Amino acid sequence: MLAALTACGEKAAPPPPSAAQTLAAVRDAKSLPPETYVSPTAGFDLHLPGIWTGKYVASEKNDTTAGAHLAVEFKFKPDSGSAAPSHLLMTIRLFTKAAWDKVSARPGAPVGVKLAESGKTVFVLSLPEANPYPATSPEAPRYDQLIISIAQGGQQVHLAPR
């Protein structure tokens, strides 16, 4: 089939990067200047690895998941020529201290990881369980790079309450 595509003048899509190539891209991106998201309503600045610049869209909404009162969702932004949908990369939920104490004490999987606390507000990070894009899609390795960049030491998100 590759020969047929080449014969017609069409180029075959390059194979997606390997896991080692994805990790190397994340390591190389450590030299990029950090990206900063300034929350217009939730009262925090979020510092992200520079590899995130231009690759996400954030929205804030009321949210009652597990007792939270506000959520900031960060969705992956596919390349401009892609018809792929935008999927959730991470969510920052805001809890009152009392609500967080209650939800973090219950058994089972945690709602997320506490990033910061300011006054009576606790800021909690939640990540998706899996990459929602097909493994062979161009979006899958780009999505993985963003998730890996915040999960690896030295590139984690930093939330600064205002």
Image (cartoon, helix red, strand yellow):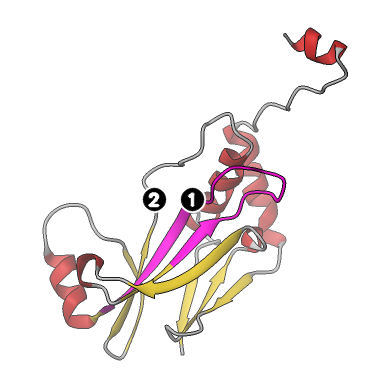
Q: Are marks 1 and 2 in contact (CB under 8 Å)?
A: yes
- Say above or below: 41 vs 11: below
Mark 2 sits on what residue?
Answer: 128
Residue ID at (56%, 39%): 140
Q: Is residue 150 above or below residue 96?
A: above
- Lower position in the chain sequence, tag 1 or tag 2: 1
Q: Is residue 69 left or right of residue 99?
A: right
Query: Could you tell me which secondary element the residue under label 1 belongs to?
Result: loop
Specify whether residue 81 is painted magenta.
yes
Camera-nearest label, 1 or 2: 1
Measured from the top left, where is residue 67 in percent x and y? 20, 72
Which residue is the site of mark 1? Answer: 87
Q: Nearer the viewer, residue 28 or 68?
A: 68
Magenta segment, which residues? 73-95
Q: Does the stretch in magenta take in 104?
A: no
Q: CA distance from mark 1 to mark 2?
A: 10 Å
